[in-house]
């Protein structure tokens, strides 16, 4: 698969080992895993942070295999899903950092290009999330609103 903004091919990533069922050596059963996910979400952890904590501290290699649901589905069932998805939040924070940098260094053309590329990724991802119903209807990205949300 080719890169989005570069004219070169990417390297293939690592693949997960094939596993069909939850391993016996794992300390938690599916119900306990769901309660841990809710506890970690109340402690304001993101879904990727929850997955890493479960993997590293509670020896749960894969939440989806163990429970049959993803972390975000479990959060959605418990009405704890974030308003803006985590990957979109990360891109918006990156755009804010780039904008702050450009305000300080106005002649940095590479950062200006990176900001426009990041904003195009944000718009593309937001269009997908609006189509899937994961963002509120009529949600639009703008740097001014992003500053209010994340600062």
Image: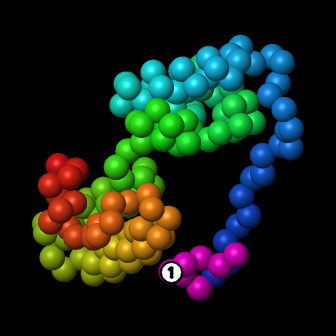
- Indicate the colouring scheme: rainbow
Location of residue 74 in the rendering, given as x and y in whole percent from the top left corner: 55, 36
Identify whether 137 is placed above or below 50: below
**Could you tell me which residue is drawn at 59 percent across and 85 percent down?**
7
**Could you tell me which residue is drawn at 15 percent across and 66 percent down?**
144
The residue sitting at the top extreme is 27
Identify whether 7 is placed above or below 29: below
**Could you tell me which residue is drawn at 29 percent across and 70 percent down?**
138
Q: Is residue 50 left or right of residue 59?
A: left
- Give residue 105's quadrant in the image: bottom left
Location of residue 77 in the rendering, given as x and y in whole percent from the top left corner: 51, 37
- Give residue 146's quadrant in the image: bottom left
10 Å neighbourhood of mark 1: few (<14), some, or many (≥20)? few
Location of residue 112 in the rendering, given as x and y in whole percent from the top left corner: 28, 78
Location of residue 16 in the rendering, given as x and y in whole percent from the top left corner: 78, 46
Q: Is residue 34 left or right of residue 92?
A: right
Q: Which residues are magenta?
A: 1-7
Q: Main secondary structure of the magenta part?
A: loop
Residue 58 in sight in this render: no
Q: Is residue 70 left or right of residue 111?
A: right
Disc 1: which residue: 5
Number of numbered discs on residues? 1
Q: Nearer the viewer, residue 84 or 45?
A: 84
**Could you tell me which residue is drawn at 22 percent across and 70 percent down?**
142
Residue 107 in sight in this render: yes
Q: Nearer the viewer, residue 134 or 2?
A: 134
Q: Is residue 104 left or right of residue 87?
A: left
Q: Is residue 77 magenta?
A: no
- Give residue 19's quadrant in the image: top right
Q: Is residue 4 magenta?
A: yes
Quarter of the N terminus within the rendering: bottom right
Report helix, strand or loop for mark 1.
loop
């Amino acid at each position: 698969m080719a890169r989005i903004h570069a004219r070169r091919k990417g390297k293939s990533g690592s693949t997960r080992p094939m596993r069909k069922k939850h391993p016996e050596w794992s300390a938690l059963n599916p119900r306990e895993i769901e309660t841990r996910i809710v506890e970690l979400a109340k402690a304001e952890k993101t879904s990727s942070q929850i997955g890493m904590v479960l993997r590293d501290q509670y020896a749960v290699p894969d939440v989806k295999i163990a429970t049959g649901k993803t972390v975000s589905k479990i959060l959605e069932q418990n009405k704890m899903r974030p308003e803006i998805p985590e990957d979109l939040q990360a891109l918006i924070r990156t755009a804010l950092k780039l904008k702050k940098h450009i305000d300080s260094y106005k002649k940095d053309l590479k950062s200006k290009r990176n900001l426009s590329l990041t904003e195009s990724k944000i718009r593309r991802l937001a269009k997908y999330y609006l189509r899937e119903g994961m963002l509120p209807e009529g949600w639009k990205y703008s740097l001014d609103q992003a500053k209010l949300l994340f600062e």
